[in-house]
Image: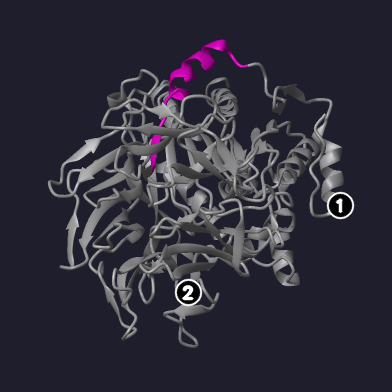
């Protein structure tokens, strides 16, 4: 029998013990389920091909240019693979049950190995490991207990830095590791809050560090590695509006810093900061969208950056010497991530996903502009040309941006191509987490299954508080405005009623993490207009969530949701929490949770399941004992997806 995890307050532990082992629950391997009926073999068979799609992500270039390191899944979890050439075989290097992430090489080829991170059971207490390419053996470098951030290598490749919570479990202090003694980390400086290293200076004497307070507020600093002295970069004048930074890289002469920020602007812009004068030059002032990612070549002669254009990525190159910016043409519209220049600076690698293709690795030769696809991930034997391409829509919501003009909420709409079996299409509203995330155009196999196999329309709304639409939009749900984002779902239900092809009587709302809260909140507000809800690792009560979430992230969440220690805010959070209003929910519910979730603890799901049952609703419940914030292992993800499809079929087609 699994023991109930020790939580931060004793009543929560007692609560967990009281409900975790209900006699109604069935255990199959690491999955505990309740009220989920046996699944029809035909449905499981139909989902099988979609569940056997996979994607590939660029992690790093091999130091001597002999191929790329990618992460992809062939077994239960994502592992590291070597691809030597375009279309080459994927040679698997790591073989763990747990997913591997954040892999990199030292810039010095003499260190023939891979530095990577791995946790256990989705706990997110990541540990650092060194994989020796010659022996194939891995060595634990970190303490095995704390949460460790991704490593940043020095330019020489003889050292790397990373953050760790080992001092007190809360703050991300900076540690320095020499490759001469890689299992011994030297603490550089104690830091309070959430910090991360962005780039080493060209002389390897300083770091540019990001201090994150919230999605709307962060700070850049120079950190002297010899003395530990921290100096603010671009300090704000008293009374100035806060600034959010997204990335930074030193120039080759160390006199300038290329950075991404929204200072005095609505969107994140690429800028050049001159340290001598303190002046900034905006390099993307003509682009009215966020710069979402930035990378610099090893010789610091070139930048690559992507722009989030209404949920689609556009790729740009910037020549530092000439100041010339070039848009990369002829790329499919989708998501670009994981950009990295080759060690010789002649090529740019990146990952690209569209609505019809899983993520794959591409390489651009800079001199010619030729782009080659290095990996071609499987799509379960399906014809990717039949996958649905969504439309970008916007619908009016409840408030006005000017007299007589309603605010518009952007959304991504997947409409089935086949005729609706009952005259109109049922609808799944899928709400992203964050809350400051964004639904973008990417490949989602479950969405394609719903649209192409079940004939269900799927809408991904980017309600207020989503990133990608300017910082004013990002702030619209903060604090006491929390439920305004829920009203945006009500407005979407209004819009669905006006669409002749959509069935407003058959709408299910789904989401994970903060999106799970939105599901529960939508059910309390619009129960009579919804056919059911699917909540995955969602917040059911903001006060208990803030009390029990892990120490290292609590202050960040308080800035976003409100500080539960303030009596007025606590009363507000209690009042709007779905658990407080659970009696309004009478429709079918599906709740899923990872037992080891460090962000939204298992007690959030347990207390919601118990409250629904007390209210006469028997929710479908799935608890994965070896997962955290979402289902990462294939067998668990498959079981969850199959159950979700069965739940939707029941709500949409069996009444």
Horizontal side of residue 351 vs 177, given as left or right: left
Quarter of the view holding residue 559: bottom right
Local SS, label 2? strand
Q: Is residue 645 above or below residue 119?
A: above
Q: Which residue in the protein does label 1 denote? A: 10
Q: Is residue 254 above or below residue 495?
A: below
Q: Which residue in the protein does label 2 denote? A: 221
Q: Position of residue 153 (x, y in %)?
A: 44, 56
Q: Nearer the viewer, residue 524 or 573?
A: 573
Q: Residue 501: tell me if it is visible.
A: no
Q: Nearer the viewer, residue 466 or 407?
A: 466
Magenta segment = 39-59
Let me know if residue 351 is in the magenta part. Answer: no
Local SS, label 1? helix
Identify the residue at image location x=46%, y=42%: 113
Alpha carbons under labels 2 and 1: distance apart = 40 Å
Q: Is residue 304 above or below residue 3?
A: below
Q: How is the image coloured?
A: one colour
């Amino acid at each position: 029998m699994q023991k109930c995890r020790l939580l931060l307050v004793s009543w929560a532990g007692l609560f967990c013990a009281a409900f975790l082992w209900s006699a109604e629950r069935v255990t199959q391997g690491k999955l505990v389920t309740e009220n989920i009926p046996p699944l029809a073999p035909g449905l499981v068979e139909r989902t099988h091909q979609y569940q056997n799609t996979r994607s590939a992500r660029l992690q790093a270039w091999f130091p001597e240019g002999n191929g790329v390191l990618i992460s992809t899944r062939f077994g239960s979890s994502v592992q590291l693979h070597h691809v030597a050439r375009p279309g080459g075989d994927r040679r698997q290097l790591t073989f763990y049950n747990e997913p591997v992430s954040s892999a990199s090489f030292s810039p010095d080829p003499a260190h023939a190995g891979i530095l990577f991170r791995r946790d256990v059971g989705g706990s997110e207490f990541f540990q650092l490991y060194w994989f020796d390419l010659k022996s194939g053996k891995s060595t634990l470098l970190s303490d095995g207990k704390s949460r460790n951030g991704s490593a940043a290598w020095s330019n020489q490749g003889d050292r790397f830095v990373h953050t760790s919570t080992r001092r007190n479990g809360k703050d991300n202090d900076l540690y320095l590791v020499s490759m001469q003694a890689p299992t011994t980390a030297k603490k550089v400086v104690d830091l309070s809050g959430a910090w991360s290293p962005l780039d080493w200076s060209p002389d390897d004497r300083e770091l540019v560090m990001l201090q994150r307070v919230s999605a709307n507020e962060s700070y850049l600093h120079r950190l002297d590695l010899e003395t530990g002295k921290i100096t603010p970069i671009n300090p704000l004048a008293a009374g100035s509006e806060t600034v959010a930074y997204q990335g930074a890289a030193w120039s080759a002469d160390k006199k300038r810093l290329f950075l991404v920020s929204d200072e005095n602007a609505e969107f994140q812009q690429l800028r050049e900061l001159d340290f001598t004068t303190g002046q900034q030059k905006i390099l993307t002032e003509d682009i009215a969208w966020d710069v979402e990612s930035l990378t610099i070549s090893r010789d610091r002669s070139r930048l690559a950056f992507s722009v989030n254009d209404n949920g689609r990525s556009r790729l740009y190159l910037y020549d530092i010497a000439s100041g010339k910016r070039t848009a990369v043409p002829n790329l499919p519209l989708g998501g670009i991530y994981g950009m990295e220049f080759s060690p010789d600076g002649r090529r740019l690698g990146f990952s690209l996903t569209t609505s019809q293709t899983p993520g794959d690795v591409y390489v651009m030769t800079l001199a010619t502009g030729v782009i080659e696809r290095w990996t071609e991930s499987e799509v379960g034997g399906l014809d990717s040309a039949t996958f649905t391409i969504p439309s970008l829509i916007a619908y009016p919501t409840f408030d006005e941006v000017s007299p007589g003009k309603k605010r518009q909420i952007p959304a991504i709409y997947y409409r089935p191509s086949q005729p609706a079996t009952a005259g109109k299409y049922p609808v799944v509203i899928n709400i992203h987490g964050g809350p400051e995330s964004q639904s973008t155009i990417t490949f989602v196999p479950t969405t394609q299954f719903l649209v192409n196999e079940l004939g269900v329309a799927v809408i991904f709304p980017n309600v207020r508080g989503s990133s990608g639409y300017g910082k004013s939009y990002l702030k619209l749900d903060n604090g006491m405005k929390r439920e305004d984002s829920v009203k945006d779902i009500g407005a979407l239900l209004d819009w669905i009623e006006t669409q002749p092809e959509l069935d407003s009587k058959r709408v299910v709302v789904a989401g994970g993490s903060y999106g799970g809260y939105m599901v529960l909140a939508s059910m309390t507000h619009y129960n009579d207009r919804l056919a059911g809800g699917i909540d995955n690792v969602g917040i059911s009560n903001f006060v208990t969530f803030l009390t029990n979430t892990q120490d290292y992230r609590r202050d960040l969440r308080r800035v976003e949701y409100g500080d539960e220690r303030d009596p007025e805010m606590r009363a507000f959070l209690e009042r709007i929490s779905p658990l407080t209003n659970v009696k309004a929910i009478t429709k079918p519910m599906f709740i899923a949770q990872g037992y080891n979730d460090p962000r939204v603890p298992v007690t959030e799901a347990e207390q919601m399941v118990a409250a629904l049952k007390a209210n006469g609703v028997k929710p479908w419940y799935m608890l994965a004992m070896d997962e955290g914030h979402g289902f990462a292992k294939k067998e668990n993800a498959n079981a969850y997806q199959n159950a979700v499809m069965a739940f939707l079929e029941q709500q949409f087609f069996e009444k």
